[in-house]
Amino acid sequence: MLVERVCETERVREALRAAEGGTSSLLLLVGPLGIGRSAWLRELPSCFPEQDLFVLRAHAAPMEQDFAFGVVRQLFDSLAPGTPQDAREALLHRAGAARLVFGDDSAATAETDGGAAPDAVLHGLRALLEQLGTQRPLLILVDDVQWADDWSLRWLAYLARRPYGLRAVIVCALREGEPRTRDPLVREVAETATGTLRLAPLSRAATAEIVRDQFGEPGDDAFVRACHETSGGNPVFLMSVLVGMALAGHRPTADQAAAVRSRIPAHLRERLAACLRNQPRPIRDLVAAIATLGERGTPDLVTRLAGLDAIGYTVAARALRQLGLLAGEEEPRFVHRVVQEAAEASMTLAERQQLHETAAALLYQSGHPAEQVAAQLLAVAASGSSWSAGVLRTAADTALSRGAPDTAARYLRRALLAGADEGEERARLLIHLATAERHFDTAAAERHIAQAMSLLGTARDRAAAALHVSPGFLGTAGAGALDILRRAADDLGSPARLTGTPRDLALRLEARLSHCAREDPYELALAVRQLRDGAPEPQVCSAAEREWLAVRLHAVTLSGSLPAAQVARQAVRVLEREPVNSPGSHDVLPLVLSALAAADAVDELGPWLCGAEAACDGTAPGTAGPLLDIGRAMLSLARGRLAHAREQAERAFVPAESGRREGAALATIVLAAVALETRDPALSERVRAHTLARRPLGLGFTTMLRLLDASAEAQRGDTARALETVLDCGRGLEASGWRNPVLFPWRPRAIALLSRQGDLRAARALAEEEYKQALLWGAPVALGRAQRLRGGLRGDSEGVALLRDAVHILRGSAHELELARALRALSLALGGDAEARPLLREASGLAAACGVFWWPQQPGGGSATGTGTRPDTALTPTESRVSALAGDGLTNQEIAVELGVGSRVVEKHLTNSYRKLGISGRRELGLLLKRSGTEPRT
């Protein structure tokens, strides 16, 4: 506790030297709460081992203020360990003060003089000190002098005014900001001081030294910085955190910095709470107001909530800053979260409730945002305000629009307590609550929808309530959701017999029930018949008609039983009319986007994305932003741009996960597809962890997980088990009627595994099945891939013809990576033909543009490097660009200038690229790019 206290210690040393010559002094030690005054006084005598001193100590306390000469008694009692008792009593007797100060009549004797200490007593005590000083210099230490009793304060002032001949140095510690510092006697002692010592906050270097002493090892910079910023250089705050961290077994490492910032030491909280309870009423009121309003508190608001005027606020705030509890000079903010908790602990429950209700009314009347008012209402058990329910509903709308459904649900639950007990008003609140809950707690949402429907009087209103139950894109609806939808549909009747809004409600209910049954092959066949036998151009004017058509298109896409071109044409009609920010867009657009991607019709997605971005004015308000990112990710995935698809899905994943479940589901699907294509085990594990958190899992998510399992098994060399897993996935999909070759390409994976086992007959049989299903679906990417698989399993001229057909078909596809694979397969099949090399260069260029690099093979099967063929390796777009520039011969510094980044960033990307490509440096990178046909930039 003597760290960075050298200057103050030297001041006392100089005063002691002067005292030896007969010049006494009184030094006032000042500072806020926790700055280390008591600890420094405790250690101070040990700093002067070369001097023979009488050390007298006393520590004043609030409970002893009525004990006359209490501090004086402590001072002389502290002499006992170093002074013979007989000598001490003889000194007291000769001074004539023993009975007055230490006897039972001391207080009564003092009171007889009308409040003024008898000069004889004060002089006698001074004479005692003077006589002690003839033997040794005196060091008199008084801590928390602001709590000293009046008699002791008078005596200290008496000594300070008569320093000559004492040979004493008196050091009185005074806590700034305490109300009693303004007491006339305390001010008299302060004014008679010959010097003032002000302890400053610890520097960061001092914090690092204390961290090292506490843990026995140096702390990481991030840990020390967190300690210093959190404590503000206050030794007590710092030590409270460090001791707690050490007792918990933590080390001073960078990963513990967050724990330092969040730690709330319990004993420090209680100490601060006790300090606050002893403050005058205006200060306590200001503390309570700041704690209630938190970060939203402005000087005007906290002044009004505390019931102070401008002058009262200024005085109270100054006292809190002197105590070291407020940070800065402008906004009323506590220096640490522990002060906030201490302030709350110093109030009763009734006081906190009243303050929060008053704060809510104050914010409401001042026109503050609804969420700020709602935050105060949440802390009130029951508000009697008529406006509270409306404010809570408005706040919930705001929370939902920013993607915080859990917060919205909290507001709405509180609104239920403040709203009507029965009737339609309560039903609307329950529906609103279910709308928020369905993003994170579907069971609760279904329960609240059922409760709301029981309060509604018409079939139309009950149907509208039921539609807040959403089956989701790939999720599985529970029995409760199905029951709600069926009851509402039966109650409302068939859409064919209805018009207007009731018809729209019935169409949407029919669509939801159909989507819930999408794993039933009978329901899939029914959807196909409705779309095939219905009107050539189903109506898409209303949101209900678009949802109905989107569900049918999704069912047809899963089954792959109608031409992809027909599905794409209808999907574009929905896409053109469904606003990205409409309330139902997150139920409709995912179905349409997946249908277009499966149909290899993504050229229609580009213009839609541009129009959607323009409609959002570039800001993507609400939850449209993640949906647009997912649209971009699906577009990139359908084009084979794996690195771009991953980046865009990652960007959409976090906000979608925290807001819309469907957004997170779509992002997960894209990331799973990328993980399967790139064989990335870390990404696969992340997708697995997120998917398993979704309950219950539908067929789509289950299949995705099983295919990831098969990929991992194949990489471990367990080909037989991987093959069985893939075939089992295929059997499950076939049983449910999900036969689309683009959405779930299980046969190509099974074919590759069968080929690895040498079972070409079974592989060819699967390839023929894939081709038949691709013909039925008709998407170019499916047909071209099927022809590549068929041709690759043959080694004759017919195989070459099939590969040529695959290339021809895929040139009409948007999937550049599939075209690259077909080109490479054809070039290798052609052997040493002159036609092969241009095809291989084109294939490698397309793959590189997709972020995939291959170890090039010479036509005829030989490796350009003699090491055989490596799997496709996906680089990020940045890694691809850095690798291309390095292959052009640019140095790291030149690449850094080109890209506007640091050379260390370039080095990191090159290192990652070398690792992924399995090469050791620039020489092999240049060879790889040259062999792959990548042209140098001009």
Image: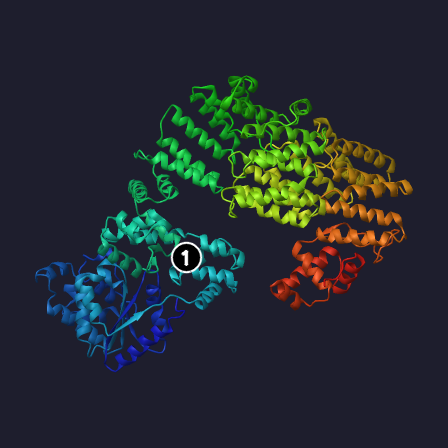
Q: List the residue tagged with mark 1.
A: 240
Q: Position of residue 902 (x, y in %)?
A: 60, 65
**Residue depicted at 66% across the width and 35% down the height:** 595
Residue 365 horizontal side relative to residue 249, left or right: left
Q: Position of residue 504 (x, y in %)?
A: 53, 25
Residue 493 horizontal side relative to residue 304, left or right: right
Q: Quadrant of residue 936?
A: bottom right
**Residue depicted at 43% across the width and 56% down the height:** 241
Residue 811 horizontal side relative to residue 608, left or right: right
Q: Quadrant of residue 206?
A: bottom left
Q: How would you rate the neighbour count of disc 1 (Cα within 10 Å): few for under 14, some for 14-19, many for 20 or more?
A: some
Q: In the rendered image, is residue 80 in sight?
A: yes
**Residue depicted at 38% across the width and 33% down the height:** 415
Eyeballing the image, is 741 above or below 250? above
Q: Quadrant of residue 330?
A: bottom left
Q: Nearer the viewer, residue 708 or 247?
A: 708
Instruction: Locate the C terminus by quadrant.
Output: bottom right
Q: Nearer the viewer, residue 152 or 305?
A: 305
Instruction: Locate the N terminus by quadrant.
Output: bottom left
Q: Position of residue 809 (x, y in %)?
A: 78, 41
Element at label 1: helix
Eyeballing the image, is 418 above or below 757? above
Q: Position of residue 69 (x, y in %)?
A: 18, 62
Q: In the rendered image, is residue 757 in sight?
A: no
Q: Amino acid at mark 1?
A: Ser
